[in-house]
Amino acid sequence: MVSSCWNPFLFSSFFGILILSIPCFSEKAPYSTFARDATSSPKVISFDYIIIGGGTAGCALAATLSQSFNVLLLERGDLPYGNPNITNINGFSSNLANISPSSPSQLFISTDGVFNHRARVLGGGSAINAGFFTRASDEYVKKVGWNEKLVRDSYEWVEKKVAFEPQVKQWQSAVKNGLLEVGVKPDNGFTYQHLYGTKVGGSIFDSQGQRHTAADLLEYANPTKITLLLNATVQQIMFKPAGGGMKPRANGVRFQDSQGNSHLAYLKEGSMNEVLLSAGALGSPQMLMLSGIGPAEQLQAHGISVLLDQPMVGMASSGPLELDWLRTMANNFARIANQSLDPSVLNRGILNSPIQAGVILEKLAGPFSSGFLQLSSKDPNVNPLVTFNYFKDPRDLQRCVQGMRTIAEVIESTSLFDFKYPFTTAQSLFNTMLTFPLNLRPRHLSASVSLEQFCVDTVVTIWHYHGGCQVRKVVDRDYKVVGIDGLRVIDGSTFIESPGTNPQATVMMLGRYMGMKILRERLVGARN
């Protein structure tokens, strides 16, 4: 179904308030008029904007820019619609346990020996995650330097499509009351805001248990100005060569469809047309490196021509990289997985366990520790090597211990009494956790008596990756790649710190926010 209307957009600029009336169109998912498989694409196409990655940021960005300009959105996965493991809350664990080549959830193991997943589906991480929705704190917004009103407006734009107040059931209610009982106050009730104390946050699952992903934001798109190509794997970004003191300028991308056919997408003529990279905290630094932007020594080792020596691509740490050590760690974990523990079997076993149990997770905000990403292949289908360096900074370990002590108090609280077997203690539950194959890290006997060792041995991911193309290191405050024209990175890879309890709301907001800023830039540019 397609409908149209007229929507007034307000832009603040140095010239005052500009009012622009733009035709507003909408089409309900699954977008039959503008979404198609990449195999149907011509060999050569051209657009005003080319967006790499139809994920949490890319969908919001594409929908916004399509109100005024011709947009190409390239997604390496397929639609989330029609897959009950994505669309229904009961399919969450089955989706993560799916290790088939076409799985929307791509399993990989970090060099730290921790199971991870990378989205390969329209909607990105919002199509495979647990659905928690919370904004960044006001302090975070001020620290980053975003326009506070545009941030609020952008969150609200997102929330109209994908955010809901969840039904708080018995287990969640008991944990909430337990937190309050042990002093984690105040009680903030239900809110999308990121606040200290105890709260009930939002969810992208509605009251019927149906998931609403960033892909739903494409219902805001103008279907006459957007093309969405699915199963389109970008091989590299293309550039006009630098000359006469000019920077290299992005002018298109080369992508491959599911049958291995190569296609070229170029930017139309226009100094303000751009390639926008929104492939996520893993995909965006990987794509920059595959395109010749990254640490020169690493690129040359893979036979990639260096366009720009940028050692901070893929980095979130200031320490030196030990490449041989990294490869050794990766090979060791691969050998462990192949010879004794099949990670795919472990993954399915954990996620599809028949055990009925409540889970309490602790997340370290920040964190202080930082890791790095390196290419493992020139093939964009092969995941890069990722090292997260869990607890490298001792402050993170101490915060984990403090959090585990709070969890122990909650377990022992009267609020959770009815959820425990008789004589069950927090320590007995910790000991039970040590028997589960949560990761491929070594187990130590001391983990049963040392919370420090327990944290180290049982660490798991909740997938909130960020960094790799950080502001002030790889991109400027307008998210333009430093040293390159016509190329921005707009996604969680630019974050210096992870916002909120779950970053997905802020990544979606960022797509809308930057789309509006770019439209404003174009409008002001046209006036000049």
Image (spheres, rainbow, N blue to C red):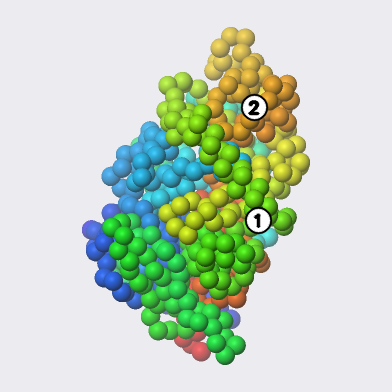
The image shows residue 385 at horizontal and vertical percentages of 55, 50
Residue beneath the point at 70% across and 35% down: 400
Q: CA distance from mark 2 to mark 1?
A: 28 Å
Report the amino acid beneath label 1.
Ala
Residue beneath the point at 56% across and 64% down: 299
The image shows residue 37 at horizontal and vertical percentages of 27, 59
Residue 296 seen: yes
The residue pinned by badge 2 equals: 443
Give the SS element for disc 1.
loop
Relative vertical location of residue 321 with respect to residue 454 in this rendering, above or below: below
Mark 2 and mark 1 lie on one chain; the one further toward the N terminus is 1
Residue 21 seen: no
The image shows residue 337 at horizontal and vertical percentages of 51, 34
Report the amino acid beneath label 2.
Arg
Number of residues whose C-alpha sits closer than 10 Å to that of mark 1, classed few (under 14), some (14–19) or many (20 or more): many
Relative vertical location of residue 224 with respect to residue 354 in this rendering, above or below: below
Residue 97 is marked as: none
The residue pinned by badge 1 equals: 316
Which quadrant of the view contains residue 14? Answer: bottom right
